[in-house]
Amino acid sequence: MKRSVVLALFLSVAISPMAWTQVLDVEDNLREKNNDTIMGWRRGGVSSLNLSQTSLTNWAAGGQNSFSVNGLLSLFAHYKSEEEAWDNTLDIGYGLLKQGRNSDYMKTDDKFDFLSKYGRQAFGNFYYAALFNFRTQMTPGFDYAADTTKISNLLAPAYLLGALGLDYKPNNYFSAFIAPVTGKITIVNDQELADQGAFGVDPGENTLTEFGGYVRLIFSRDDFTPELLRNVSFTTKLDLFSNYLNNPQNIDVNWETLIAMKVNRFLSVNFTTHLIYDDDIDIEVDGVAAPRVQFKEILAVGFSYNF
């Protein structure tokens, strides 16, 4: 009897570490798979249309009639296999504002941004990757404070960027792309603006070519588990570029954030911010032209559809 008890204890002590190790291995494998289990194509997007209107008649407190419309379309198509990762995104935004009965419509938003990034696994969660990005606007832009002076146009500016580097993708919602070899072309396809040397091009020229290093960080998630965040989609993208050939210490910054909160199936609240700093773009304030931080914020409530 004693021998049986001793033998049983010995076997339990000997076997339990092995069993525990197997359990841990299974948990580690499940945890690793849960981080990035979706293979093949994932497609989807967010679209929204937001309207705002104010009408005043004999309003003693004063004010102006106004009407505004703002539209947003954000699409993605991502492919994932054991050895490959291919991410594609398209962001389009446009907005108009009319103040007063006799005024013209003024543009409040105008964006076209396409990005494609392809990578093959190098080791672990790291991929050898190539990235292409094209950004521009769709209609002319004016400085309404300066009597509607034209300051931008379709393809003026437009930005082409190509980069080769290493992409870190630990899961489906975060990516860190570091590219020491990057080419950037600024296009000003409006001769009036090109003759002014707008957006950093030499006066009279239509393009500016730069060579440098590039970093792109992106976090995008719409599957938060806390009940409070159940209907919230959050995306933030940060682009950093340094021109090796001219003032490499002056980093160009492009940082965008989108928070989409669904009230019900078709009603949503969207909050977007966009921060830009480009050492090649001079902005005049109080008669002084110099590179400055640009910032845009849009809060909109309206129709939305996720797909």
Image (spheres, helix red, strand yellow):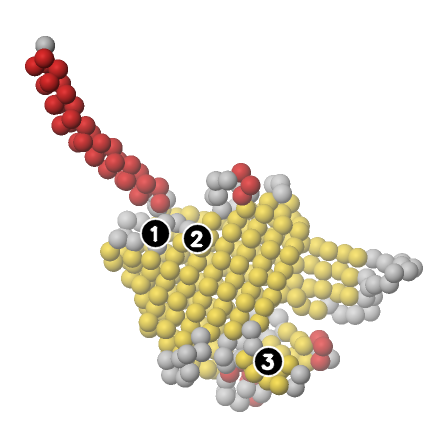
Whole-percent x and y of residue 35?
35, 45
Q: Which residue is mark 1?
A: 170
Most foreground residue, 64 or 201: 64
Tell me the amino acid under the disc marked 3. Ile
Circle 3: is it few (<14), some (14-19), or many (20+) Cα within 10 Å?
A: some
Whole-percent x and y of residue 245?
38, 83
The answer to whether residue 206 is visible is no
Q: Say which residue appears at 48% left-offset and 43% top-offset.
A: 224
The answer to which of marks 3 and 2 sits earlier in the sequence is 2
Image-based side of 24 in relation to 96, left or right: left
Circle 2: is it few (<14), some (14-19), or many (20+) Cα within 10 Å?
A: some
Q: Disc 3 vs disc 2: Cβ atoms closer than 8 Å?
A: no
Q: Which residue is mark 2?
A: 77
Which mark identifies residue 283?
3
Q: Say which residue appears at 10% left-offset and 19% top-offset.
A: 7
Image-based side of 116 in relation to 148, left or right: left
In this view, which residue lies farthest toward the left?
3
Q: Say which residue appears at 24% left-offset and 56% top-offset.
A: 123
